[in-house]
Image (cartoon, helix red, strand yellow):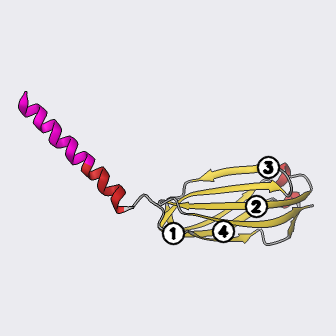
Amino acid sequence: MKLTKLLASVVAVIALTACEDVFEDGSLQPDGSNPALTIRNPTKNQKLAKSSGLRIKLTASDKDKVKELHVRVRAVGGDADHINFTTLPDKKILEFDTLLNANVLPQGDYTLTINATDFRTNVSTDEVLFSVK
């Protein structure tokens, strides 16, 4: 019985020490190195026809890998998202290129907001204004 308790204690100490090392190392803490993020499409003040769709093309990169990419389209001055989704790329260099249905966007001005988060919780944000005609 004493041997079982001793072994359980040793395992617990090793497990807690391993967890403490991870946090002391700071590997899960922000390191001040935000992901690089560049939106290539749509371009600033681009006018889109609904029939052509909304092509989103961007590059995101980070030495710790891009963990999460959040895409949001909101009318200028509006408070509701027309498009809102997240993808989990798990890549150091992400080339993101997709075509979305623009029929959900009434005529007007919009802001495309992209957030890229790395595995150390550093976040970069980029925005582009565009119009739907």
* Residue type, numbered disc 4: Leu
Lower sequence index among marks 1 and 3: 1
Q: Quadrant of residue 112?
A: bottom right
Q: Is residue 3 left or right of residue 108?
A: left
Tell me the element at label 3: strand
Residue at disc 2, secondary structure = strand
Depth order, front residue of 55/123: 123
**Measuring 47% from the left and 67% from the top, which residue is drawn there?**
31
Q: Which residues are magenta?
A: 1-16
Residue at image mark 1: 32
Residue position marked by numbered label 2 in the rendering: 112
For label 1, the SS is: loop
Q: Amino acid at mark 1?
A: Gly
Measured from the top left, where is residue 116 in percent x and y?
Answer: 60, 62
- Do the numbered discs 3 and 2 sit on residues whose CB atoms are within 8 Å? no
Image spot of residue 19 (x, y percent): 31, 50
Q: Which of the two residues, 126 or 25, is positioned nearer the viewer here?
A: 25
Residue at (67%, 50%) from the top-left corner?
A: 85
Instruction: Tell me the tag on residue 82.
Output: 3
Q: Amino acid at mark 3?
A: His
Residue 58 - label = 4
Tell which circle, 1 or 2, labels the residue nearer the N-terminal end. Answer: 1
Question: Which quadrant holds the C terminus?
Answer: bottom right
Q: Are marks 4 and 1 in contact (CB under 8 Å)?
A: no
Quarter placement of the N terminus:
top left
Classify 10 Å Cα crowding around label 2: few (below 14), some (14-19), many (20 and above).
many
